């Protein structure tokens, strides 16, 4: 076995399992310290919780890589903690645009509502009740003969992975509408790019059984993340050019002579 293959077999699983903590721990700590979740979108834990719960139930029918199962379990624990901290520290109801943050900045506005105000409830209890009912429904189905159906198992996996793959799409749309990547953290983008690169290497090089549903959705998400990286470079460069043009215009208005600054 080559050194690269050995690194993938032992290093990639550890990276995958720990990635939920490395990606979201700083957000949890930040909200806890500031005592405010203003600027944070509750859609993030919603998407990741639904996707991860579906992947756990998918494992009982597919028995795919245990590393990916462990990652889903760690993701659930991480997102539950993130949701708890975010709900406990939500801004007052008067701050209608408070719950808004990458990667969904600008997608959910205070004036927009969803059917039955889904995941926009003012009370905390409905969030936990929805997750409880969701897990209970899947558990009941798992105890029935339908859980032995290959079509049902494939539906669980495809749905969970498809939900997770949509995570970058809202940010891409927001960037196109605003013509900028304002609000998109470089650290978040870097974590996604590095994580997806490692994940794809593991999917295609690991000797463990990786279902094609993981590979297809992983490719889609990886393409979206790299397109986000392209957007970030393009819009950041345009912003710097605009700032430079504005500075040159100010110099022309002042006579074209820059002011020399000296520092002690």
Image (spheres, rainbow, N blue to C red):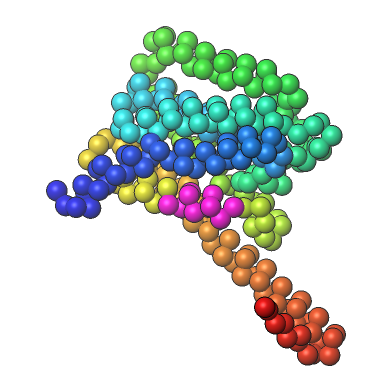
Tell me where residue 27 appears, x and y as whole percent.
Answer: 58, 40
Span shown in magenta: 185-194
187 in the magenta segment:
yes
Q: Which sits in the foreground, 261 or 221?
A: 261
As drawn, is 94 to the left or to the right of 194?
right
The residue positioned farthest toward the left in the image shown: 1
Q: Which sits in the foreground, 9 or 116?
A: 9
Q: Let me know if residue 172 appears in the view.
A: no
Displayed quadrant of residue 93: top right
* Residue positioned 75% across, 78% down in the render: 247
Residue 241's place in the image compared with 211, above or below, is below
Tell me where residue 195 appears, x and y as whole percent.
Answer: 42, 47
Displayed quadrant of residue 120: top right
* Residue positioned 59% across, 66% down in the render: 234
Displayed quadrant of residue 228: bottom right
> How many marks can you see?
0
Most common secondary structure along the magenta stretch = helix
* Residue positioned 54% across, 31% down in the render: 79
Residue 179's place in the image compared with 46, above or below, is below
The residue positioned farthest toward the front in the image shown: 264
Tell me where residue 86 appears, x and y as whole percent.
Answer: 65, 32
Quadrant into which the C terminus falls: bottom right
* Residue positioned 21% across, 47% down in the render: 6
Tell me where residue 236 appears, x and y as whole percent.
Answer: 62, 66
Q: Let me know if residue 239 appears in the view.
A: yes
Residue 69's place in the image compared with 138, above or below, is below
């Amino acid at each position: 076995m080559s050194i690269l293959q050995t690194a993938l077999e032992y290093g990639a699983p550890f990276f995958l399992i720990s990635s939920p903590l490395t990606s979201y721990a700083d957000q949890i700590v930040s909200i806890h310290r500031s005592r405010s979740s203003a600027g944070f979108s509750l859609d993030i834990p919603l998407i990741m919780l639904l996707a991860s719960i579906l992947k756990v139930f998918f494992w009982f029918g597919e028995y795919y890589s245990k590393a990916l199962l462990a990652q889903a379990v760690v993701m659930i624990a991480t997102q539950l903690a993130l949701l708890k901290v975010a709900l406990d520290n939500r801004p007052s109801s008067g701050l209608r645009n408070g719950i808004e943050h990458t990667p969904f900045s600008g997608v959910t506005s205070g004036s927009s509502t969803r059917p039955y105000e889904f995941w926009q409830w003012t009370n905390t209890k409905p969030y936990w009740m929805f997750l409880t009912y969701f897990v209970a429904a899947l558990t009941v189905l798992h105890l029935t003969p339908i859980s032995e159906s290959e079509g049902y198992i494939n539906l669980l996996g495809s749905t969970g992975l498809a939900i997770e793959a949509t995570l970058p799409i809202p940010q891409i749309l927001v960037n196109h509408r605003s013509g900028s990547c304002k609000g998109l953290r470089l650290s978040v983008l870097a974590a996604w790019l590095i994580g997806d690169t490692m994940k794809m290497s593991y999917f295609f090089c690991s000797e463990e059984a990786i279902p094609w549903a993981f590979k297809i959705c992983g490719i889609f998400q990886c393409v979206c993340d790299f397109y986000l990286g392209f957007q970030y470079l393009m819009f950041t460069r345009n912003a710097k050019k605009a700032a430079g043009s504005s500075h040159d215009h100010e110099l022309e208005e002042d006579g074209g002579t820059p002011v020399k600054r000296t520092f002690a």
